[in-house]
Amino acid sequence: MFPEWRDFRTAFGMAAHRPNPAALRAEARLLTIAGFFLLGVGFPLTLIMTAIALGSGDGSPFVPAAIGAPPIMLGYLACHFASQRMVKAKAIEGERR
C-alpha cells in the first residue's frame, strides 16, 4: 500500500545523528559567548539596581532580583550546557583513539 512508509531504515526521520567533536566544540563556544554576555549584563544590572534601591529607599528590594535574575540564570545555564558539550566532545574523542 505505502512502500515508502515500511522501509524505516531509509526514512529521513529515523536517521541517527552522531555528533562529531568539532561540532560540539563549536556549539560550546557559541553557548559560552552567549552565557558570558548574559552574565556580563545581568550582574552589573543587578548591582546598579541594588545600589539605587538601597540608596533612595523608594524602590522595592525585590525589583533588582526580579530584573537581574533572568539574565543571570540564562547565562549560567548557557555556560553549564557549554561545559556539558565539551565533556561529550572529549568523551567522543576518547572513544575514537
Image (spheres, rainbow, N blue to C red):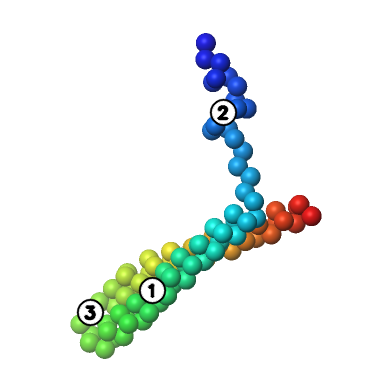
Q: CA distance from mark 2 to mark 1?
A: 45 Å
Crowding near the residue tagged with mark 2, few <14, some 14–19, many ≥20 C-alpha atoms within 10 Å: few
- Foreground disc of the pair 2, 1: 2
Residue 76 in sight here: no
Q: Earlier in the sequence, mark 2 or mark 1?
A: 2
SS at mark 3 in the image? loop
> Relative to 38, is 8 on the left or the right?
right
Q: Nearer the viewer, residue 83 or 1?
A: 1
- Foreground disc of the pair 2, 3: 2
> Relative to 54, is 21 on the left or the right?
right
Q: Position of residue 35 (x, y in %)?
A: 47, 67
> Relative to 74, is 63 on the left or the right?
left
**Residue at 60 percent of width and 60 percent of height:** 25
Q: CA distance from mark 2 to mark 3?
A: 59 Å
Q: CA distance from mark 1 to mark 3?
A: 21 Å
Q: Which residue is mark 1?
A: 41
Residue 19 in sight here: yes
Q: Vertically, is 43 above or below 95? A: below
**Residue at 32 percent of width and 69 percent of height:** 66
Dot 1 and dot 3 residues touching (CB under 8 Å): no
Q: Nearer the viewer, residue 39 or 97?
A: 97
SS at mark 2 in the image? loop
Q: Nearer the viewer, residue 61 or 4?
A: 4
The kind of residue tagged 1 is Val
> Relative to 1, is 56 on the left or the right?
left
Crowding near the residue tagged with mark 3, few <14, some 14–19, many ≥20 C-alpha atoms within 10 Å: some
Q: Vertically, is 94 above or below 10? A: below
- Foreground disc of the pair 1, 3: 1
Q: Which residue is mark 2?
A: 11
SS at mark 1 in the image? helix
Q: Which residue is mark 3?
A: 59
